[in-house]
Amino acid sequence: MKAGEDEQMEEKVDHSGDYIFRYKLDLPSDEVCLPRNALNEMLRAQLKNILDLVVPCADGKEVKVDGFKLLSDRNTVYGLNDGLEKKDSGSVPCRNTKNAALYEPRIDFIRRQLESLLSVLELEKSGEPMKVEGFRLKNLADWVVSSQCDPVEVFEHAATRCNCNCVFCYNKGTPPSLALVNTKRSADEELLELRTRVKYFAPKAYLSLFPSIGSSCEVLAHPHIIEILSLLREKTDKPFRIVTNGASLTPELISELSRLKPLFLDLSLNSAAPSRRRLLMQDRAPEIAIGALTLLRRENIPYAVGVVPWPLGSFAEMLDDLERTVGYADEHGAHLIQISLPGYTRYFASKKVFDRDHLWGAVVGRVRELRGKYRTPIVAMPSMYEENVYEKRKNLPGVIGVVKNSPAFFAGMENDDLILQVNGINIRNRPQAREVLSVIHRSGAGAASITVQRGERKVETTLDPAKYFYPYARETSTHLGIVFMGTGLRVGYLERLKEIIRERKAKKVLFLSSALVKPTLEQCLAGSNFFGDGEIKVVVPENRFFGGNIFMGDLLVVQDFIDCIEEYVAKKRSKPDLVVIPSSPFNLSQWGRDLTGRVYLDIEKATGIPVELLECATIYD
């Protein structure tokens, strides 16, 4: 860098050499008239701000607060939502802090507190009014949070640029409030931030610097990605799981990546035909990604191939290309092939692009045919769609694929095997099978006996965790090479649901599910004796925020839930005692916020009906 550039970089770091995290304030201009009761509005804003982060308690029990009184006026109650429109987004952050606000809302809390204070006062310096434009984080050690310490938490911040322009790109259909902010920083400035994140990344203590919203851009397109990954490798031996479009996978880059093992690549190939990949992704050199499969196998880097079957041309052309791409991935040693069933939001197109059920049905039908033709496991995502269409009984521990050269492969496991026992433990559902196999995999224990139902007969075999070679890798693979139809629904969730209902003494419960989970949930509820005479009504909210043909439950937002409850009450002309919502739409961070940054507690405030979250992991895997 030149001397001037050195000076600019110095302005980006503090005295300790840490990158400076800056946030702008959104202050009203001098011409804007403040509310008549500006001081009361300041108090209301600050209290509401605090209640977006904490829940008051009395005698150990939560207290729902919807207003306040002034000590100087005990007769007037000020509602927290007075003057707010029904669909006010509450805690949606302003543009310049929204990325941090979803994962570390205390930053947005500080912004709003400062803005409310500065609406009624001015700061001074040397006796003169001082204009404040923003703030910076002072001591980054104060902003270290508990974490799984997956290296992706750090290197995903390098995904700030892209070298393709996919037809189905997230950025083409995202709502404006979720658009990824282009900060237009230089690669060198981004490197400063990433070095600071590596510095505070503490895998042994499970601590890291606060995260922020991810990106749909390309990690491997960053000019400093090898330096970033090398710094991380000095701190952890955990696998790097890198999602890539493959356009950067030159022989030179693959060689450098090979020195950073263990790692696993999720390669979004989409088509093994250069002409179609060029059309789908506007990849100027599609041969690089297509040819990378041979190089990855040569370097013993395990990878999965991803395909989004977008209806470019006729359905027949799409399905034929899907089959050729699956065959190519199978021939070149892919660990897994993931078919991501496509969707689009109302922001992507104002008119219908394709019929979701027709396209999804055709793709899943072809996938099921291909499983009988190729050995590489093929998963259609979301898996519950296939299960709902083809499986009468849900949640079973059925095998849909076996990774080549894995312990399960050498034990003779086959597609359509139904697992009955593992090491003498009776297996009743898919989550149980996955958990037992995961324990065996992680423990490094000796051989495991397994009994399966294969057609009309039972078959017993033994899985040796030490018997494997490429493309299976113990550090990056799971379940000893057995591939299931998704995670399934844990029976333990029903036990917790029973506890919630008992604690709330509720008789009429409204459970807000998704279209994908509802069939499995209702089957589990029907087969359970947990709930006695209580009534549990399962209802699916409409995803109006995203619109289009999006119907994934984890993409629902607070306002979608509010609208659903209000419409349900209006239709039934009665209120449920309790609303229960799976926590997965709010799993983005530890703070119970949806994709817009809004707190789930707003649902109860808006509807006046008690709301509880049922803690659960994201089922879409």
Image (spheres, grey):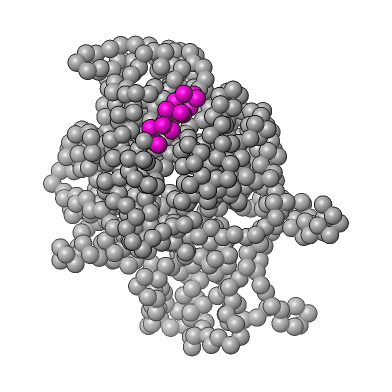
Report the side of 404 relative to 194 (left or right).
left
> 32 and 57: which one is in front?
32
Frontmost residue, 206 versus 96:
96
> Residue 430 sits in which quadrant?
top left
- In the image, what residue occupies the spot 45% across and 79% down? 70
Estimate the x, y position of residue 64 in percent, counting from the top left: 36, 64
Check the image and report above or below for 376 versus 542.
above
| Relative vertical location of residue 308 with respect to residue 5 in this rendering, above or below | above
Q: Nearer the viewer, residue 345 or 45?
A: 345
Residue 546's quadrant in the figure?
A: bottom left
Answer yes or no: is residue 504 visible. no
Farthest residue to the right: give it: 3
Is residue 322 highlighted in magenta?
yes
Query: Of helix, strand and loop, which mostly describes the magenta segment?
Result: helix
Q: Residue at x 52, y 20 (%)?
A: 470
Q: Is residue 567 visible?
A: yes
Left or right: residue 220 compared with residue 310:
right
Question: Looking at the picture, how far across and down is residue 326, in whole percent?
Answer: 41, 31
Q: Residue furthest left?
A: 533
The residue depicted at 75 percent of the width and 78 percent of the height is 125
Highlighted magenta segment, given as a residue range? 321-337
At 46% from the left edge and 51% from the top edge, which residue is drawn?
Answer: 167
The answer to if 66 sits in the magenta stretch is no
Locate residue 541, reporting x and y percent. Answer: 28, 56
Number of callouts: 0
> Would residue 509 be found to the left or right of residue 366 on screen?
left
The quarter of the picture where the C terminus appears is top left
Q: Is residue 398 above or below residue 44?
A: above
Q: Position of residue 521 (x, y in %)?
A: 24, 42
